[in-house]
Image (spheres, coloured by chain):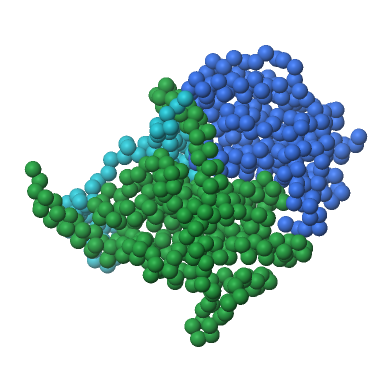
Chain colours: A cyan, B green, C blue
């Protein structure tokens, strides 16, 4: 007889759905699944019932590495003062097309 | 060795960052620091919501094998499936706060976690299915539209998804009631009977008057909830009564009147004794709902285990 | 028997198989072993209802007496149903449901693959659409056969019991009714007997992967496609048909 205290709710996976070929994969949410194949099927049943997708990726939640909010400033603010990375920084005389 | 005072100071700094974000209407995301109270309130609320969706599958499942047309059967199956899906999204949102789904299920079974008491009422005739879609989901939409603007990212996103799907639930319920009211005398009687039994439980879904609800006040403070129970209830009442009158259904409230000055309907006082009793576990179906859930869970253990063992054996 | 009667009978069988199996799956609502599987089973039930509606509506059109999908579903008694005995068997436990689904989906997969080419355009179209759905049902139930058949000792035991219980209903999958002959000759219906080898291959493919013994070709129970059913169908219909029969003037 199995132990009722054992957690048999299956590991957590994160689901990414591509709405149509060529589009980016967007995070849709999570599912519980025992393995890759079932995770794909379950994600299909949970997240694409209203024709929301043509392709699915699944990843075990514990395999996702994430930046920490407390590091957001040092990671992302420095990009704010480099406008020369954008095409709009560069102005040319009328009549010139690049 | 960290000095207690240093820890407190750090917490105060983090708290002020958190509060600033709330005031700016920024979303709080899973890995961030949040006050313990905020985390606890959210866990309670999200898991209550998740459990409600799942338990809600039972009163409707009660009629799915007796749906009187293939079209209605398909619609009801799709709706029940959605409810299961909503439970799933919400358990997922709760899990981002650090609680596992097993723990939430255990809490549901032990009674430690609650679910919306509206699902402790029985579905006695086919029109109840219409009443649930129209009134119960209608009330849920009023609530959920507000929650979709809430401060916790995963919950807010789950709610947006749910709101999109909930629209169909509400409409198919009203459509069913219209069909019944345009039907035979027996069908009309079924519809009015369902109305009589579901109206007050739907109003109770909005919870106690805010002045009597600690939880309501805390959730408003944390911008998880942005409108009061009473305001939401009034929105629902004002929107729904004309829908009922349009199809000839009577509201089971002898004191109901429309206040010309305020532009709102005024209802009798809700039977709070019934409300608190049902919440406490004395409703018509409380025991049955939980026992069914426990049974499915226990009987399913060998299935869930088999899948885990297979995965391990095959390294997938 | 005219060709019309034969075609009506054939479409009824296709519709009834999906209808009755869908009804069985809908009994799982809220009771599945895990929330995710509640969604999966309901999904299959929904696909099957869709198939039932198409075939039954078409059957009613062929008959030409004004019977709709609902008249056919709710106002026939058991003897007029043409579904296989397999699909009316009770759900039992999840292993039982899985084996029933696997056996049926493997059959439906090969049936619709062949029926896509039916000389009757409507049947061909319905078969093509259903094939997509059934491909997924077969994939899903095959994965569960593997996981339960080769999971724990307990799950394997349940699978073996279920196979033992249901095997005797699989012979009927490859039976034709006498009415089918003309339709088969005209390329409208599929000769069910040719599906047997394909089905065996699919089933053995899964059984082999997890060392499940293939049952001996024992005595097979039949009769469903001729309207002679098991005791189960009567109860299933009593529940399913109650409302329209109790309120015959009502529209729902």
Between C100 and C27, the residue placed more toward the observer is C27
Q: Position of residue B168 (x, y in %)?
A: 57, 58
The residue lying at 49 percent from left, 65 percent from top is B272
The residue lying at 59 percent from left, 62 percent from top is B198
In the image: residue B235, left or right of residue C91: left
Q: Position of residue C225 (x, y in %)?
A: 79, 31
Between C220 and B215, the residue placed more toward the observer is B215
**Residue A66 against residue B167 in the figure, above or below:** above
Quadrant of the rendered image containing residue B189: bottom right
**Residue B169 against residue C150 in the figure, above or below:** below
Q: Position of residue C101 (x, y in %)?
A: 62, 31
The residue lying at 75 percent from left, 51 percent from top is C243
The residue lying at 32 percent from left, 37 percent from top is A62
Quadrant of the rendered image containing residue C190: top right
Q: Position of residue C15 (x, y in %)?
A: 74, 40
Q: Is residue C216 visible?
A: yes
In the image: residue C93, left or right of residue A95: right
Residue that extends furthest to the bottom in the rendered view of this protein: B261
**Residue C59 against residue B146 in the figure, above or below:** above
**Residue C82 against residue C165 in the figure, above or below:** below
The quarter of the rendered structure image containing the C terminus of chain C is bottom right
In the image: residue B223, left or right of residue C34: left
Between B207 and B16, the residue placed more toward the observer is B207
Between C96 and B296, the residue placed more toward the observer is B296
In the image: residue B137, left or right of residue B308: right
Q: Is residue A44 visible?
A: no
């Amino acid at each position: 007889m199995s132990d009722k205290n054992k957690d048999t709710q299956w590991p957590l996976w994160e689901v990414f759905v591509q709405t149509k070929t060529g589009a980016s994969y967007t995070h849709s949410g999570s599912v519980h699944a025992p393995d890759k194949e079932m995770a794909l099927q379950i994600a299909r049943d949970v997240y694409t019932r209203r024709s929301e997708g043509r392709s699915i990726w699944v990843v075990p939640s514990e395999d996702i590495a994430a930046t920490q909010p407390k590091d957001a400033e040092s990671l992302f603010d420095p990009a704010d003062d480099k406008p020369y990375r954008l095409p709009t920084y560069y102005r040319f005389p009328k009549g010139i097309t690049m | 060795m960290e000095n207690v005072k240093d820890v407190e100071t750090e917490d105060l700094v983090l708290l002020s960052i958190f509060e600033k974000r709330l005031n700016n209407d920024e979303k709080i995301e899973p890995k961030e620091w949040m006050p313990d109270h905020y985390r606890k309130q959210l866990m309670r609320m999200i898991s209550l919501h998740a459990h409600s969706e799942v338990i809600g599958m039972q009163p409707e499942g009660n009629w799915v094998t007796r749906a009187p047309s293939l079209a209605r059967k398909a619609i009801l199956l799709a709706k029940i499936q959605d409810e299961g899906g909503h439970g799933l999204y919400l358990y997922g949102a709760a899990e981002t706060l650090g609680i596992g789904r097993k723990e939430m299920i255990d809490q549901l079974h032990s009674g430690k976690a609650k679910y919306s008491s509206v699902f402790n009422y029985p579905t006695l005739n086919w029109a109840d299915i219409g009443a649930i879609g129209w009134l119960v989901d209608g009330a849920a939409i009023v609530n959920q539209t507000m929650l979709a603007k809430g401060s916790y990212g995963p919950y807010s996103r789950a709610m947006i998804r749910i709101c999109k799907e909930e629209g169909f639930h509400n409409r198919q319920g009203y459509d069913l009631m219209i069909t019944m009211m345009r039907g035979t005398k027996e069908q009309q009687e079924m519809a009015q009977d369902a109305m009589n039994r579901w109206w007050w439980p739907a109003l109770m879904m909005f919870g106690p008057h805010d002045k009597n609800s600690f939880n309501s006040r805390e959730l408003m403070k944390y911008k998880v909830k942005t409108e009061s129970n009473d305001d939401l209830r009034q929105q629902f009442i004002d929107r729904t009564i004309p829908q009922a009158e349009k199809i000839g259904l009577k509201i089971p409230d002898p004191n109901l009147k429309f206040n010309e000055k305020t532009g709102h309907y005024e209802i009798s006082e809700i039977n709070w004794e019934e409300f608190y009793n049902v919440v406490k576990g004395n409703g018509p179906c409380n025991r049955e709902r939980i026992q069914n859930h426990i049974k499915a869970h226990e009987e399913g253990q060998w299935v869930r285990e088999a899948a885990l063992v297979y995965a391990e054996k095959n390294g997938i | 028997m005219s060709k019309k009667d034969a075609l009506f009978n054939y479409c009824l069988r296709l519709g009834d198989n999906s209808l009755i199996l869908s009804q069985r799956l809908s009994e799982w609502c809220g009771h599945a072993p895990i929330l995710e599987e509640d969604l999966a089973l309901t999904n299959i039930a929904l696909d099957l209802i869709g198939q039932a509606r198409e075939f039954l509506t078409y059957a009613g059109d062929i008959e030409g007496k004004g019977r709709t999908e609902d008249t056919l579903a709710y106002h026939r008694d058991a003897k007029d149903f043409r579904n296989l005995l397999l699909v009316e068997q009770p759900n039992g436990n999840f292993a039982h449901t899985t084996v029933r689904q696997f056996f049926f989906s493997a059959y439906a997969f090969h049936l619709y693959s062949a029926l896509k080419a039916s000389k009757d355009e409507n049947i061909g179209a319905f078969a093509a659409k259903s094939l997509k759905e059934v491909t997924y049902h077969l994939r899903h139930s095959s994965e569960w056969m593997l996981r339960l058949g080769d999971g724990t000792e307990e799950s394997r035991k349940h699978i073996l019991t279920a196979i033992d219980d249901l095997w005797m209903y699989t012979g009927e999958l490859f039976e034709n009714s006498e009415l089918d002959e003309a339709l088969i000759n005209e390329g409208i219906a599929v000769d069910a007997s040719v599906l047997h080898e394909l089905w065996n291959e699919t089933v053995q493919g899964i059984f082999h992967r997890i060392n499940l013994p293939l049952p001996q070709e024992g005595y097979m129970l039949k009769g469903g496609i001729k309207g002679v059913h098991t005791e189960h169908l009567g109860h299933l219909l009593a529940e399913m048909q109650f409302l329209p029969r109790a309120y015959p003037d009502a529209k729902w």
